[in-house]
Amino acid sequence: MAQSTFHFGFGMLCATVCTIKPVIQAWCAARIPEGRQSPAAAVAAPNVPTLSSAIARWCLWSYAIGTLAVFPAVVRRMTGMEPTHPAWNLFVGYPLIDRLPLPSIILGEILMGSILGAQYGLILLAIYRHRARLSSTRRRK
């Protein structure tokens, strides 16, 4: 159970790798066309989600996959059963992480903290970017 932070962090990392591409596409596609006065009129490329929905999807998926990654360790701790059945491999990295001789639980905390920090930082940058665009359109009027 000591490595559950690493399980959770590894699950968050896997979800981040899978969901970061739409976030980058939405960040690059969000622009205000010339002649438009409001950020609400921003035009995005087709099939590109809005930035807020892409970031929300990234955060939700990372927490969900992190929870799924730590679930076998919690169940094993509560029931005392060893993961001998193939159904225990709910998360792909669980057997690998359990066999690794990790020196400290600080690795899991660093991994979780860096992903949470990246999510929080990107949300703050998106808010700052939106406010800067909003104030620049108000100056044009």
Image: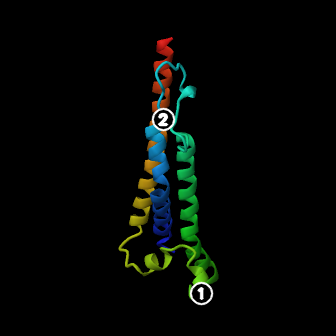
Against 133, residue 118 (above or below) is: below
Residue pushed farthest left? 103
Whichever of callouts 2 and 1 sits on the residue coming sooner in the sequence is 2
Q: Quadrant of residue 13?
A: bottom left
Q: Amino acid at mark 2?
A: Ala
Against 107, residue 97 (above or below) is: below
Q: Badge 1: how crowded within 10 Å, few (<14), some, or many (20+)? A: few
Residue pushed farthest top? 141
Q: Which residue is located at x 44 percent, y 46 percent?
A: 24
**Closer to the eye: label 2 or 1:** 2
Residue pushed farthest right? 79
Q: Position of residue 81 (x, y in %)?
A: 60, 86
Q: Badge 2: how crowded within 10 Å, few (<14), some, or many (20+)? A: some
Residue named by callout 2: 30
Classify residue 30 as left or right of residue 107.
right
Measured in 3D between alpha carbons, the distance from the residue under mark 2 to the one under mark 1, in whole angstroms, is: 47 Å
Q: Amino acid at mark 1?
A: His
Colour scheme: rainbow
- Whether residues under marks 2 and 1 lie with C-beta atoms below 8 angstroms apart, the answer is no
Residue named by callout 1: 85
Q: Position of residue 90 (x, y in %)?
A: 58, 75
Q: Which residue is located at x 55 percent, y 44 percent?
A: 47
Q: Position of residue 86 (x, y in %)?
A: 58, 84
Camera-nearest residue between 19 and 60 = 19
Classify mark 1: helix, strand or loop: loop
Classify mark 2: helix, strand or loop: loop
